[in-house]
Image (spheres, grey):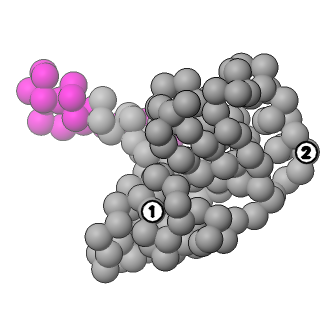
Amino acid sequence: MGRYRYVVFGAGRQGTAAIHDLALNCDAREIKVVEPDAARAKTARARLEKLFDKDAVALSFLQAASVSDVERSDVLLSCAPYAVNVGLTRMALAADVPFCDLGGNPETVAEQEKLAAKSKTAIVPDCGVSPGLSNILAVHCARAHGADEVHVRCGGLP
C-alpha cells in the first residue's frame, strides 16, 4: 500500500486519467474522487476498476467535499472546470493542503496567486497540458536551441 492520500476533483476524462496515474505511479494509499455528477462518477469508477487492482489503492467517490474531507490529504488536484478553482484553492488553504489544478483561465490564476501570496501552502495553478506541460517543453526547447522567442499553441489556439 502506498504512502500518499490524494483528493481529485472531477472524474471526467482528464480526472480519470489523473486518478489512474496517481494509482499506478504516485505511491497512492488513498484517492478520494469528488464528482457531483452521479453518472460521470459511475462511469469513472467502472473504468478505473478495470484498469487497476481495487485492493491496491483505497478509492472512494464523494459528490461534494468540505475542508474536513480533505484536511488529512497530501495533495488536492483539480480536474474540474476552472470556474470552481478559486473556491477549491480557498478550501486547500483552509485545510493547509497543497493544491494543483489543470488551469486554463488567466483571471482565475490571478485570483489564486493573490490567495497563495498570503499563505505558506503550495498552490500551483495551470498544471495541465497548456498552459502547463507545453510551457515546460517550450522553455526546455528554447534553452536547448538558444531561441530568443517562443510561441506556444495548443489545439491551434494562441
Quadrant position of the C terminus in the picture: top left
* Residue drawn 21% across the image and 29% down it: 140
Q: Nearer the viewer, residue 19 or 68?
A: 68
* Residue denoted by label 1: 97
Image vertical order of residue 66 relative to residue 59, above or below: below
Label 2 residue SS:
helix
Spatial CA span between label 1 and label 2: 28 Å
Q: Position of residue 45 (x, y in %)?
A: 80, 35
* Residue drawn 52% across the image and 60% down it: 72
Q: Main SS of the magenta segment? A: loop
Q: Image check: 102 left or right of 38?
A: left
Q: Position of residue 53 (x, y in %)?
A: 70, 21
Identify which amino acid the numbered label 1 is placed on.
Answer: Val
Residue 49 quadrant: top right
* Residue drawn 39% across the image and 76% down it: 115
Q: Position of residue 128 (x, y in %)?
A: 48, 42
Q: Image check: 113 left or right of 66?
A: left
- The boundaries of the magenta stretch are 138-158
Label 1 residue SS:
loop
Image vertical order of residue 130 relative to residue 109, above or below: above
Q: Is residue 84 visible?
A: no
Numbered mark located on residue 39 in the image: 2
Image vertical order of residue 21 relative to residue 73, above or below: above
| Disc 2: CA contacts within 10 A as few (<14), some (14-19) or many (>=20) | few
Residue 120 on the magenta span: no
* Residue drawn 69% across the image and 21% down it: 52
Q: Position of residue 51 (x, y in %)?
A: 71, 19
Identify which amino acid the numbered label 2 is placed on.
Answer: Ala
N-terminal of the pair, mark 1 or mark 2, is 2
Q: Image check: 49 left or right of 24?
A: right
State the residue lying farthest toward the bottom.
118
Eye-nearest disc, 1 or 2: 1
